[in-house]
Amino acid sequence: MPTIEQVRDVLATINDPELHRSIVELGMVKQIDVAVPHVTVDLALTIPGCPLKAFFQEVLPAKIQASFPEITQVTVNLGAMTDEERKALVGGVKSESPSSFAGPQSRTTVLAVGSGKGGVGKSTLTANLAAALAKRGHSVGLLDADIWGFSSSRMLGTSAKPTVIDERLIVPVEAYGFKMISMGNLVEDDRPVVMRGPMLHKILQSFLSDVHWEEPDYLLIDMPPGTGDISLSLSQFVPGCSIILVTTPQQAAEKVAERAGHMAGKVGMKVAGVIENMSYALCDHCGERTHPFGTGGGKELAETFGAPLLGQIPLDPPMGELADHGKPSVVVSPDSPSAKAFEEVTAALVELIPPKPKSRPKISLPIIMSPSAPAHSG
Ligand SMILES: Nc1ncnc2c1ncn2[C@@H]1O[C@H](COP(=O)(O)OP(=O)(O)O)[C@@H](O)[C@H]1O
Ligand SMILES: [Mg+2]
């Protein structure tokens, strides 16, 4: 007959699907009773009404029965954690993988994508870069720092609301193989968000430190238009952050991007590279390139900062359409001219800034078990 310890060892191999930690480590397994052929497990969910109920009801019995042939019946009583248990869990998870990208120990490369000006394609680029990096097997986070004018959630078709535990742990939303967070995932019905500077600062801080990013290889930050507040805040939270400047070929856009680059330099951010968007149009019939927005902006910007021009993205109207329907072109239309250009830019970016090695020692979480407080079923 399996012992309680043996059953617990089996349960320890099951991860919470959102936090990616063992349910035993997370303190979710409250009580185990073994009376062959029956095992009963009291499981405390992180939040009441957790959407993962069905997952646990299926996976726990399956795992236990597969491990112990004499067990033919498994009852899972689902309850919810108490406030104290939730606080302990959040504290444990946060101390193990601090989402602070500030210190030299952080293995995440944080890249802001900025341009100074709106409408040049920052959000489109960020979404496609994130998807292209994920396609290449990198772990990626996308943080929409355009708190007021958020658009990433729409461009990536994620209207899902993230799970928030104890107000301090936000499980990011999944999109096309990467994790993301945007105000669009938090507010109702695209209602406008009225916010002052300090509030933006706080939200950015929360997006950086409360979201369970789990140290991705790359964290891309979709910057708002303008050069001010958010750059300053970002440089304070993530001192090693670099910026990728986006411009169109026009002089006017280039000059604004230049100001954004200088501003970034003032707050200690390095210009990692330049991407020129809407560089040229391709004739549908003969494939000839035309330059409706002129030429030279990207090259000039790159020279100004001594940074590489990572690539040029063509004007691709269907891509805009796709983005409006939540579909990045690199995923849904990989043969399109824009998708190919994004792939090239992504390859150049990874070559320029390869992911940092994953060599941090794993610290284990304290095991929070309180068998004296059995979870109530529900
Ligand atoms: N290369 C491109 N070809 C066609 N449309 C584009 C291209 N890049 C961006 N767009 C469109 O331009 C608009 C502005 O892009 P967006 O990414 O929101 O800019 P920003 O974030 O800089 O304000 C969007 O409608 C987008 O679909
Ligand atoms: Mg934008």
Image: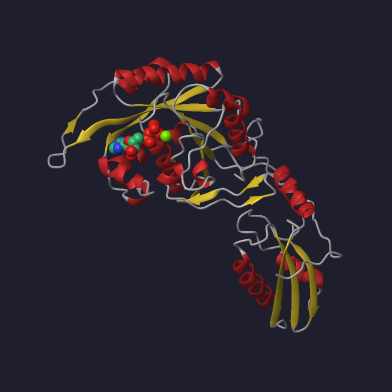
Which residue: 74% across, 84% down? Answer: 37
The image position of residue 317, as x and y in percent, is 26, 40
Q: Is residue 122 visible?
A: no
Note whether 210 is above or below 10 in the view shown.
above
- Along the line of sight, the residue nearer the viewer: 304 or 351: 304
Q: In this view, does 81 lie to the left or right of 296?
A: right
| The N terminus: image quadrant | bottom right
Q: Colour scheme used in the picture?
A: secondary structure
Q: Quadrant of residue 250?
A: top left
Residue, far left? 286
Question: Within the image, what quadrant is residue 236 found in?
Answer: top right
Q: Nearer the viewer, residue 262 or 363?
A: 262
Give coordinates of residue 30: x percent, y percent: 78, 65
Q: In this view, does 338 lie above or below 201?
A: below
Q: Quarter containing ligand 2?
A: top left
* Residue in the picture at 29% in, 24% down: 249
In the rendered view, tell whether residue 48 sits above or below residue 183.
below
Task: Say whether residue 287 is left or right of residue 134.
Answer: left
Q: How many labels does the image show?
A: 0
* Residue 164: x %, y % from top left: 63, 50
110 in relation to 153, above or below: above
Image quarter where the C terminus lies is bottom right
Query: What residue is drawn where x is 45% and y is 19%?
Result: 261
214 displayed left or right of 144: right
- Between residues 178 and 263, which one lies in front from this camera angle? 263
Q: For the view shown, which residue lies furthest in the right direction?
A: 372
> What x and y, as percent, mark residue 365?
76, 50
